[in-house]
Amino acid sequence: MPTRFPHVASTALLALCLVGPAAFAGSPVPQVAAAHRAYADAIAATDLPAFLAAVTDDVVLTGPGTTLTGKSEVAVWAAEVFATIDARWQKTPLETVVAAPWAFERYAYRVEMTPVTGGVSATETGHGVNIYRLGADGGWRVARDIWTAGPPARAAFRPSCAEGLAPC
């Protein structure tokens, strides 16, 4: 009678190759998700110490019209933003890929901003990429946050047949 062991072993080996060892040996994705929550919660709470604890010393933030390099430069900017704008953030991870000691996260965001002195609220939506780095202490932190405001490019640019940019 034929044995099933070779089939079971080959199926397990195929699964390991397809999904990677992280799925079987304590995936770091939950830790990266926790780092995302800590970062996003600190921003939402305008908690400067928690925000700075969630980023690396060499953090780079790049958004529309600005690039901030290093924790000290980011701290000055964040302190000013947190003191002048009441913001309601929703930062939703769309995809996370881990290649330790790095992790890459694509996200979408929505923020409603009101000056703390009162006034008209503004809503902004956009998308971005967070790059996390695993620290010597075993914690994941944001090393890069790169974002752009507005809808994703495919939604903003819809070629039309009338303009000769798409088949009719």
Image: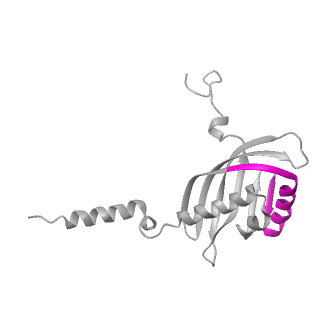
Please indicate whether residue 92 sits to the left or right of residue 80 in the image.
left
In the image, what residue occupies the spot 67% across and 35% down? 156
For the record, the magenta segment spans: 66-90
In the image, what residue occupies the spot 81% across and 54% down? 66
Please indicate whether residue 21 sits to the left or right of residue 5 in the image.
right
Percent position of residue 125, x then y:
71, 43
Percent position of residue 154, x then y:
62, 38
In the image, what residue occupies the spot 76% across and 41% down? 123
Please indicate whether residue 45 sits to the left or right of residue 4 in the image.
right
Above or below: residue 113 compared with residue 55 = above
Query: Which residue is the extreme one toward the left?
Result: 1
**Residue sitting nearer the eye, 158 or 16:** 16
The reply to whether the magenta stretch includes residue 67 is yes
- Residue 124 seen by the camera: yes
Percent position of residue 56, x then y:
71, 70
Quadrant (top left/top right/bottom left/bottom right) for the C terminus = top right
